[in-house]
Image (cartoon, rainbow, N blue to C red):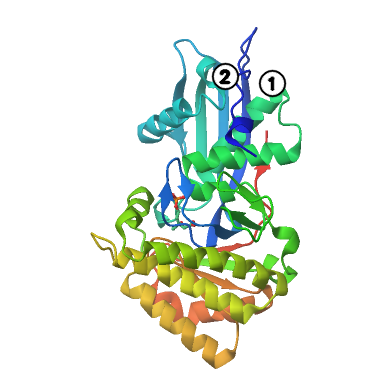
Amino acid sequence: MQHSFFENPELYFKNDIPTGKIVWKSPSNIALVKYWGKRPVQLPMNPSVSFTLNNSVTETAVEYSPAKKGLNVTFYFEGKRNVSFEEKTKKFFENITNIFPFLNQLEFTIHSKNSFPHSAGIASSASGMSALALALCSIENDHFGTLNNENDFFRKASYVARLGSGSAARSVYGGVVIWGETSAVPGNSDLYGIPVTGNVHKDFLNYHDTILLVDSGQKKVSSRVGHSLMENNPYAKTRFKQASENSVKILDILKSGDKEDFIKIVESEALTLHAMMMTSNPYYLLMKPGTLNIIENIFEFRNETGIPLCFTLDAGPNVHLLYPDENSESVNNFINDRLKPYLSQNGFIKDNVGNGPERLI
Ligand code: PMV
């Protein structure tokens, strides 16, 4: 599918301009193979593969009515007016009027809230941008009927979410999602994510992700800056090749159910992401002492018990613990007995692989 599918110049109101309200709840996701490095416009340098989460969600209500003075946005985050989100959303909408020409005819009041604590240091761009993209696709379909086909609807939502935040392209589907071109998966694209859950062993679809909040501070480096650092990273080319290969490998592993091979790729991907930040100019160290202590403890726990618990990291110090459902009691005890000293006051968030977004209104 090409760009032209997503840009329909006919999508504007020819007669009455409507009023309405749409609410979507959309989850965050955790990358198993990481997207780090992009090219214009918001296209990935390598494919990435993720688990969609279940409990870490953004709920976004979009109210729209005829614009009095052109496209306008009023944004409330967790009940309070948020000027920064307002400006970002308005700019985002202005940038996608070629995709949704009707945006120019409307003004919006948006209420958005996250299920996870705002200061927890969890990236909310994937859940937030996917919820917003889904709402815009719902406006399109409710009034123009152009996205009645479910595949078309979610593909366009993924395409639009990607323009807001790359990783958000993967949040419009449940289970396991790949975003980015690779010859190994027919129909995939740099433009949008596609679900691959049908080819995943049930053990992985029941995986848990317990997010250990090591540090709740502001992000040290924005992902925009992080991605741009890859442009001059001396190891970038090798990294992009490795990630492409790992995307193919992880899909095979997810199919086979091989938890040992899963660990090898997932942990290596996390450490490589951080290695990229350490070898950038300027360089960044995004782990905290607590992060390393937790990782050491995971290695020990795995050696002692044989339980296939592994970790992954985002571009920050928090640790995602990934493990099978059958081991959840042992892992809970491990967290309580050995990891508590390294956690911030926010503690941890219990999550698991989820079914994807849901329209509420
Ligand atoms: O979606 P962005 O631009 O915030 O980038 C996210 C990048 C990582 O979270 C570090 C990795 C990924 O693939 O989600």
- The image shows residue 140 at horizontal and vertical percentages of 65, 26
In the picture, the quarter occupied by the C terminus is top right
Q: Which secondary structure lies at badge 2?
A: helix
Mark 1 Cα shell of 10 Å, populated few (<14), some (14-19), many (≥20): few
Question: As drawn, which residue projects farthest toward the left?
Answer: 282
Question: Label 2, on which residue?
Answer: 102
Decide which of 337, 232 is in the foreground and name it.
Answer: 232
Decide which of 326, 104 is in the foreground and name it.
Answer: 104
Circle 2: residue type: Phe
Is 313 on the left or on the right of 333, as rendered?
left
Is 330 on the left or on the right of 152, as rendered?
left
Circle 1: residue type: His
Say whether mark 1 is within 8 Å of ligand 1: no
Q: Which secondary structure lies at badge 1?
A: helix
In the image, what residue occupies the spot 44% across and 11% down?
A: 69
In the image, what residue occupies the spot 58% across and 34% down?
A: 3
Question: Label 1, on which residue?
Answer: 143
In the image, what residue occupies the spot 53% across and 63% down?
A: 244
In the picture, the quarter occupied by the N terminus is top right
The correct choice, above or below, for 221 with respect to 82 in the image is below
- The image shows residue 10 at horizontal and vertical percentages of 63, 18
- The image shows residue 315 at horizontal and vertical percentages of 40, 60
The correct choice, above or below, for 261 with respect to 105 in the image is below
Residue 349 visible within the image:
no
Going from N to C along the chain, the mark reached first, 1 or 2, is 2
The correct choice, above or below, for 305 with respect to 201 in the image is below
Say whether mark 2 is within 8 Å of ligand 1: no
Q: Are marks 1 and 2 in contact (CB under 8 Å)?
A: yes
Question: As drawn, which residue projects farthest toward the top?
Answer: 15
